Amino acid sequence: MPPRLIRAVFDRVEPVYRDDGVGVELGFLTGAARIETDRIDDFADLGPELTVPAVAGIGKVLRILRAARISAPREPNALAGRVEEASALLTRALGCRLQLEVRPRSRVHFTAWTESGVETVSDVADVVEGDTEYLIMRQGGRFPVRFARDAVVRRITETERWFEVIGVERAGSAG
């Protein structure tokens, strides 16, 4: 699906600390009838080191600051790993009206309850039901996963949907 432009209000920022890195959770209130949700939650990865995801996350933070007309640090890459500083700057932008460019995203999960326990396969491309097995085809060319049909007590395929923020601009004064 092509990206969509929607208007939103920046209404939430929360620092996130994980074992694999740090960043900020971003929240936007859309109030738009054109999309399926009244909220968009996104994540800006901030490192701790300058990696491709961290540079993209820093860019997202900078675009929100620019739209809110808040001065960015002299050296923007210094925000890498500095969640508290980024959160403090973004807190000043709360309430700013933005135009977001969003892309609908989804991920499919297959969960099977078997005699030996519960197993979940993420990033599923397709589930093929054969006479004797379930063949779970995965995205990215990874090897498929097989479950014997007679070992599966219960199964479910779930789709997780969200909007990824790919662009941020200041909303115009019209409509």
Image (tube, rainbow, N blue to C red):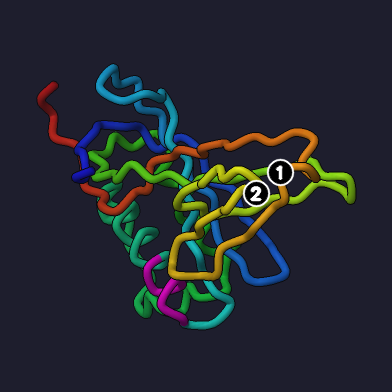
**Residue 94 appears left or right of 3:** right
Q: Mark number for residue 166? A: none
- Specify whether residue 55 is painted magenta: yes
- Check residue 103 for magenta coloring: no
Q: Quadrant of the C terminus?
A: top left
Q: Residue at x 48, y 73 (%)?
A: 79
Looking at marks 2 and 1 on the same chain, the residue that comes earlier in the sequence is marked by 2
User: Would residue 105 be found to the left or right of residue 154 on screen?
Assistant: left
What amino acid is labelled 2 in the image? Glu
- Tags 2 and 1 touching, CB below 8 Å: yes
The residue lying at 38 percent from left, 75 percent from top is 76
Residue 91, percent across and down? 49, 46
Residue type, numbered disc 1: Arg
Looking at the rendering, the stretch of residues picked out in magenta corresponds to 51-56
Q: Which residue is mark 1?
A: 149
Residue beneath disc 2: 133
